[in-house]
Structure formats: C-alpha cells, structure tokens
C-alpha cells in the first residue's frame, strides 16, 4: 500500500520546517503543493486563477478546499494520487475535516497523521519573525485549529528539534502497518 504523511497543526507549528527536514533525510518524500488562488505567499503552492479553481470544482477534482487569509486553497485528487505513485507525499493541513476528506478520497494511501503543535506564545513569536504582516489573522487561525487526539505522531515542536521530529515521522512511515501511536 502507498503511504503518505499529513502534517496537521496550527500556523507556525513547524509544518514547513519539518517538511524540509524530511526531504533532507532523503528517500521518496515530496511536499504536495496545494493549489492557491489569491495574494500572499506563493512558495509551497501551485498558484492558479479563481477560474481554474471553479473548473476543478465542476470536474469533481477537488478533495478539499478552504478559504483563509483572503485566498482559496485546495487539494486536487489526480495530482495527489500521481505524486503518491512515486513518492511519499507530505500534505499540510489545518482542519480536522480536511484529514477525513483526504482519507476518504484516497483509500489506496495509508496516511500517517502527524499533529504538530506548539504553545501559542511560541507560535506568535514565529509568526512575528516571518514578517508576513498578518499576525492577527494567523493567531486567529491558530486559535481556530482544533487539537488532534487521534494522530499517529504527536509533537510539541517547541520541545523537539526538527531533525528528531522528521526521523520519528520516517520511522512511522516505515512501520505504517503497525498502527502504533507516538508522542515525542
């Protein structure tokens, strides 16, 4: 069975940092770049027009979409499945319902769900350091992100180095059939 990784957590929990470490450790790990229509950050996304979003929606191609920071974000089924054919896709999510939607739409993939979190004050310091100019919006999103009780791996990124977190995730990927939970 194919394996993928869902990094779930609030803004500034470390999803980008942990993904970089996963890629640096080698193997077949690859970030799934979600679709994005709107302004702001473009790194880590496949930028598309709102018209393209509407086309994908009409085609039934979107597994999940959400609006945040004045933009629309989406997960398109065919690109995700294609990436899983030759890689371990890493998907960044911030809504519990998105996890359920991805799992339901991709039954051929065993998803390792990783809950990345940190205390709010640490997240705020990280957000301020990014200098994105939207601290209030990101903290509101942080507040709205539900804790995840059923993760395969649960990590406080304020207490763990990114390389240690990445190694734990890769260990979980390698033992994907064992259904064990880890807290680090």
Image (cartoon, helix red, strand yellow):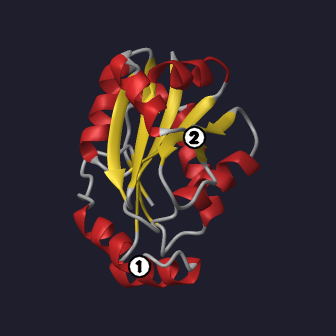
Query: First in sequence: mark 2 or mark 1?
Result: 2
For the point 60% across and 69% down, which residue is it?
161
User: Quick one: 92 or 181, which is closer to the camera?
Assistant: 92
For the point 56% across and 83% down, which residue is it?
129
Placement of the C terminus among the 4 image quadrants = bottom left
Q: Is residue 21 left or right of residue 180?
A: right
On residue 135, which mark appears? 1
Quarter of the image holding residue 31? top right
Q: Residues within 10 Å of mark 1 (few under 14, many from 20)?
A: some
| Residue 2 image position (x, y, % from top left) | 53, 19
| Residue 150 image position (x, y, % from top left) | 27, 45
Quarter of the image holding residue 63? top left
Q: Is residue 29 visible?
A: yes
Q: As drawn, which residue projects farthest toward the front?
A: 51
Image height of 166 relative to 156, above or below:
above
For the point 49% across and 44% down, which residue is it?
36
User: Quick one: 107 or 131, which is closer to the camera?
Assistant: 131
User: Quick one: 133 or 111, which is closer to the camera?
Assistant: 133
On residue 177, which mark appears? none
| Residue 92 image position (x, y, % from top left) | 47, 47
Secondary structure beneath dot 1 equals helix
Q: Residues within 10 Å of mark 2 (few under 14, many from 20)?
A: many
Secondary structure beneath dot 2 equals loop
Spatial CA span between label 2 and label 1? 23 Å
Q: Is residue 67 left or right of residue 71?
A: left
Image height of 94 relative to 76, above or below:
below
Image height of 10 relative to 100, above or below:
below
Contact? badges 2 and 1 (CB < 8 Å): no
For the point 61% across and 63% down, which residue is it?
162
Q: Is residue 113 visible?
A: no
Q: Which residue is mark 2?
A: 33
């Amino acid at each position: 069975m194919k394996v993928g990784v869902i990094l779930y957590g609030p803004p500034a929990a470390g999803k980008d940092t942990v993904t970089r470490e996963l890629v640096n450790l080698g193997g077949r790990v690859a970030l799934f770049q979600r679709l994005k229509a709107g302004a702001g950050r473009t790194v880590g996304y496949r930028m598309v027009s709102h018209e393209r979003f509407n086309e994908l929606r009409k085609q039934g191609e979107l597994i999940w979409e959400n609006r945040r920071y004045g933009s629309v974000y989406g997960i398109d089924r065919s690109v995700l499945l294609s990436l899983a054919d030759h890689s371990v896709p890493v998907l960044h999510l911030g809504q519990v319902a998105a996890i359920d939607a991805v799992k339901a739409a991709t039954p051929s993939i065993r998803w390792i769900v990783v809950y990345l979190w940190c205390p709010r004050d640490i997240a705020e310091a990280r957000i301020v350091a990014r200098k994105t100019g939207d601290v209030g919006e990101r903290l509101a999103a942080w507040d709205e992100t539900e804790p995840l009780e059923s993760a395969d791996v649960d990590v406080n990124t304020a207490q763990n180095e990114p390389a240690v977190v990445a190694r734990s995730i890769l260990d979980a990927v390698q033992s994907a059939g064992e259904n064990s939970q880890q807290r680090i």
